[in-house]
């Protein structure tokens, strides 16, 4: 056994050192000339992706997170600005997307098409960069297969369509960084336009969204480990003072990153880390297979096979082991091994692992848009490993191996296409979406543009309505919209100020329109229930509007109150009448119903008392606390509820983990 291990270790070392005679990356030597068939093939793949991503472009409906940048792009006051120029649209999201969309909205206005079509085109650029990256490291044929796999990836197609996160600019800048770094490594010079471009792309990615630092750290570390020989050769001949200055600059940048990141990261217990790893891994599986979007978008999610997520990494490991095994038994030390492909594979795997660990250790991470940062590093590593295995064989056996790998790829693509088709079937039925994702929000905006002119204020009773309407409606209508769902959600008849809140809500001198979801589509059912209670105590001051289109009535309800008055709409929550709403946390469904799968799903909804940031921790079976989510309000999905376990979700105020605001216990029924 010891002798076999020594031989196996020797084969790995020989494989890695095969090209040590050259300091430069060993070239696989793909053709530099792009033939017409290759160009047409790539164009066809991009058109296929565009067709997938724009199919029923209005479905799902415009979501709250998707609209965060619209205000800054249309000239409204952003979160942070300088000399009238938007800088930040959120505490951790820059205004890069708003800058891109400012001329688009000026020309075409705000609509689902003008919001979504540009991000689809940017994603085509991401696919193109991925193609040239694989083409440069492998061959045009393998680049075509890789791009085809990306085109049918449900997580990529669906999440880029709605730019949930946002993720589109992150993926584009990440692909650009990877390509420019590879190009820089092939150059003999230390300073080049490739390095400058990669540095600029990293800076833009961090400005777009702060969690891009996950990729920057992973890229820097993996490149040093895998390509240190190339980097050291570049430093040869460079003055020592300049090398010292570069090292100091890197250390200073790292210290600045730690200064920003460390306050956000709380070192968890080892037991908590193991649970967090399981949660993020499950989320990665759901994201890769399209299960995350299906669960969050549809009232009755389709059954999505989850094996395509873990199958990519399993195939990568299998191809690497087979390549090493065949190389060990291959006689002759001069056998031409594609060590470039091996190093590229290890490079991608190290970045994948580094990003995954950072997601696990970051308290605020826990959504599908976070795990999508792992894409397409898993696919890049898998195709590089398959290429390495194929070229380790003799010429005759390569055809058989390529055929078998093609069959495996077709099976994987078929499963991913099935997931896409499950989404597409529901896109044709607007009634299949949950209220917050309903495509009829655009129809509601059109209704308000006509019928909102005779009211003084438009109050949104539930979550997931006001943000979209303020952007979609005409400016004079949008200024009337007030997102007041926290007030209704946290009202209680037992509170001493309950009657005062009712009077402040239904002011007789203000003609107001109240918008909420129907009971079936409600995001926070308690908000709608409390509104109806308050209206009853006010003597039914708000009357249901019956003359609404039937399609709207299936999703939304409208109530109208007041005799009418001119001027600015009165604030719903005045300091003299209302106190800040109480904090709350709930789970829906709870208990989680039994099903065929091993894991059940529930959605955790929470709201802090004053709109400040809060943190939700989960305790499994009385164990240690693990950070689940953070923010002033939710919802957030928990797709890992199993039977015979108890999950207690605790809402804390701020980030100091001291003040407990509320808790809810979740269980799952046995099969």
Image (spheres, rainbow, N blue to C red):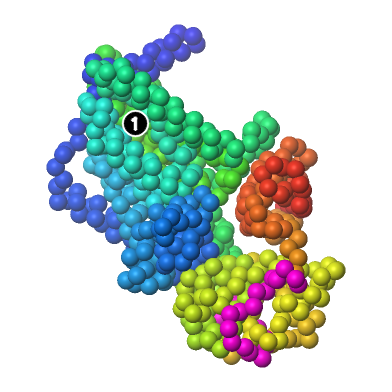
Residue 324 figure quarter = top left
> Dot 1, how many residues are within 10 Å of its Cα: few (below 14), some (14-19), or many (20+)?
many
Q: Nearer the viewer, residue 560 or 578?
A: 578
Q: Is residue 574 magenta?
A: yes
Q: Nearer the viewer, residue 58 or 217?
A: 217
Look at 35% across and 24% down and name the residue there.
245
Q: Is residue 48 magenta?
A: no
Visible in this render: residue 10?
yes
Which region is colored magenta?
552-577
| Residue 148 location (% of width, % of height) | 33, 50
Residue that extends furthest to the top in the rendered view of this protein: 3
- Vertical order, 414 against 500 (above or below): above
Look at 82% across and 70% down and name the residue there.
497
Residue 592 figure quarter = bottom right
Look at 42% across and 66% down and name the residue there.
75
| Left or right side of 340 for 535 | right
Residue 327 figure quarter = top left
- Vertical order, 529 against 606 (above or below): below
| Residue 392 location (% of width, % of height) | 30, 26
Q: To which residue does mark 1 refer?
A: 344
Visible in this render: residue 183?
no
Q: Nearer the viewer, residue 145 or 524?
A: 524
């Amino acid at each position: 056994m010891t002798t076999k291990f020594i031989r196996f270790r020797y084969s790995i070392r020989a494989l890695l050192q095969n090209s040590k005679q050259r300091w430069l990356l060993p070239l696989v030597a793909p053709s530099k000339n792009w033939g017409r068939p290759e160009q047409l093939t790539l164009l066809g793949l991009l058109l296929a992706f565009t067709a997938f991503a724009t199919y029923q472009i209005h479905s799902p409906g415009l979501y709250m997170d998707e609209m965060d940048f619209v205000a800054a792009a249309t000239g409204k006051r952003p979160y942070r600005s300088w000399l009238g120029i938007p800088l930040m649209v959120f505490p951790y999201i820059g205004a890069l997307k708003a800058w891109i969309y400012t001329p688009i909205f000026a020309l075409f206005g705000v609509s689902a098409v003008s919001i979504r079509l540009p991000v689809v085109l940017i994603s085509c650029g991401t696919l193109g960069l991925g193609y040239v990256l694989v083409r440069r490291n492998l061959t045009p044929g393998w680049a075509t297969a890789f791009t085809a796999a990306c085109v049918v990836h449900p997580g990529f197609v669906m999440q880029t369509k709605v730019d949930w996160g946002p993720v589109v600019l992150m993926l584009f800048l990440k692909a650009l960084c990877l390509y420019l770094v590879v190009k820089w490594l092939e150059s003999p010079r230390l300073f080049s336009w490739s390095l400058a471009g990669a540095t600029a792309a990293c800076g833009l990615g961090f400005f777009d969204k702060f969690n891009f630092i996950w990729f920057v750290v992973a890229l820097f570390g993996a490149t040093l480990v895998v390509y240190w020989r190339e980097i050291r050769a570049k430093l040869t001949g460079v003055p020592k003072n300049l090398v010292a200055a570069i090292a100091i600059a890197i250390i200073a940048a790292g210290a600045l990153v730690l200064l920003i990141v460390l306050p956000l990261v709380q070192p968890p217990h080892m037991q908590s880390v193991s649970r967090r790893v399981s949660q993020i891994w499950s989320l990665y599986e759901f994201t890769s297979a399209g299960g995350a979007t299906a669960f969050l978008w549809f009232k009755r999610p389709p059954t999505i096979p989850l094996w395509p997520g873990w199958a990519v990494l399993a195939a990568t490991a299998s191809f690497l082991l087979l390549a090493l095994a065949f190389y060990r038994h291959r006689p002759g030390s001069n056998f031409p091994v594609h060590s470039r492909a091996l190093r590229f594979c290890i490079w991608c795997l190290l970045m994948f692992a580094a990003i995954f660990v950072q997601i696990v250790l970051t308290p605020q991470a826990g959504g599908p848009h976070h795990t999508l940062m792992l894409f397409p590093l898993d696919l890049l590593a898998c195709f590089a490993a398959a290429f390495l295995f194929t070229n380790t064989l003799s010429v005759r056996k390569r055809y058989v191996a390529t055929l078998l790998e093609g069959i495996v790829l077709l099976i994987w693509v078929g499963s991913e296409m099935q997931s896409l088709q499950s989404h597409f079937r529901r896109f044709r039925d607007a009634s299949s979406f949950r209220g917050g994702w309903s495509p009829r929000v655009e129809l509601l905006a059109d209704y308000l543009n006509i019928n909102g002119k005779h009211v003084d204020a438009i109050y949104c009773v539930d979550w997931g309505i006001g943000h979209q309407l303020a952007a979609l409606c005409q400016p004079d209508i949008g200024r009337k919209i007030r997102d007041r769902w926290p007030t209704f959600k946290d009202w209680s008849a037992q509170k001493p100020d309950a009657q005062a809140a009712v009077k402040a809500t239904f002011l007789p001198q203000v003609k107001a329109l109240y918008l909420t979801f129907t009971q079936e589509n409600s995001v926070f059912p308690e908000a709608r229930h409390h509104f109806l209670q308050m209206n009853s105590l006010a003597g039914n001051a708000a009357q249901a509007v019956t003359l609404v289109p039937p399609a709207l009535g299936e999703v939304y309800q409208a109530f109208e109150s007041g005799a009418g008055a001119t001027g600015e709409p009165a604030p719903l929550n005045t300091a003299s009448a209302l106190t800040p709403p109480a904090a709350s946390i709930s789970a829906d469904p709870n208990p989680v119903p039994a099903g065929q799968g091993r894991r059940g799903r529930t959605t955790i909804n929470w709201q802090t008392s004053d709109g400040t940031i809060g943190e939700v921790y989960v305790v499994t079976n009385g164990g240690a606390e693990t950070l689940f989510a953070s923010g002033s309000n939710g919802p957030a999905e928990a797709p890992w509820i199993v039977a015979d376990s108890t999950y207690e979700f605790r809402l804390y105020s701020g980030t100091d983990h001291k003040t407990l605001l509320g808790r809810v216990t979740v269980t799952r029924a046995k099969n």
